Image (cartoon, rainbow, N blue to C red):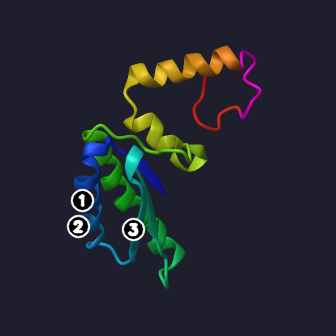
């Protein structure tokens, strides 16, 4: 997973992630592009069942994304949104920003033939 925050928020974001993951049953590793505020959050499933993993992961990402957006961040850096984060994009992205994304998509793909519905619906 990756999130991006303003560079001056990196330290606080890392500390928040470390504190937050302590409540969960999986180990954490963080890789980062310090110069652009991009954090790669690596979590390991270990021996959790699929159901436990999905539930715990969902709660953890909810907390991390909420914090990132509250501090000027976004859901993703260079890895993009993809189908995994599409519902989070709709939920967390300010309406005007999401509308601008839709307008850009429509300008480049007026017939909606390039991955229709993958990131958001027009």
Q: Quick one: SS at disc 3?
A: helix
For residue 32, side relative to residue 114 (left or right): left
Region in magenta = 109-115
Q: Residue at x 48, y 75 (%)?
A: 44
- Compared to residue 46, the image places residue 3 above or below, namely above
Give how far apart the Cα atoms at labels 3 and 2 are: 15 Å
For residue 25, side relative to residue 70 (left or right): right
- Crowding near the residue tagged with mark 2, few <14, some 14–19, many ≥20 C-alpha atoms within 10 Å: few
Mark 2 — residue? 19
Q: Quick one: SS at disc 1?
A: helix
Most prominent secondary structure in the magenta stretch?
A: loop
Per the image, is 19 magenta? no
Q: Earlier in the sequence, mark 3 or mark 2?
A: 2
**Residue placed most toward the observer, 108 or 10:** 10
**Residue placed most toward the observer, 35 or 64:** 35
| Residue 56: mark in rendering | 3
Give how far apart the Cα atoms at labels 2 and 1 are: 5 Å
Tell me, yes or no, whether the two marked residues, 3 and 2, touch with CB atoms within 8 Å. Answer: no
| Residue 49: mark in rendering | none
Q: Earlier in the sequence, mark 3 or mark 1?
A: 1
| Residue 16: mark in rendering | 1
């Amino acid at each position: 997973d990756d999130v991006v925050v303003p560079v001056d928020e990196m330290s606080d974001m890392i500390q928040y992630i470390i504190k937050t993951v302590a409540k969960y049953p999986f180990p954490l590793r963080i890789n980062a592009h310090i110069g652009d505020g991009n954090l790669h959050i690596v979590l390991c499933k270990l021996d959790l069942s699929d159901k436990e993993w999905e539930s715990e992961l969902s709660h953890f990402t909810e907390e991390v994304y909420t914090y990132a957006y509250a501090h000027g961040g976004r859901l993703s850096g260079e890895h993009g949104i993809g189908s995994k984060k599409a519902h989070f994009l709709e939920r967390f992205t300010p309406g005007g920003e999401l509308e601008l994304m839709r307008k850009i998509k429509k300008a480049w793909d007026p017939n909606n033939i390039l991955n229709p519905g993958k990131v958001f619906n027009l």
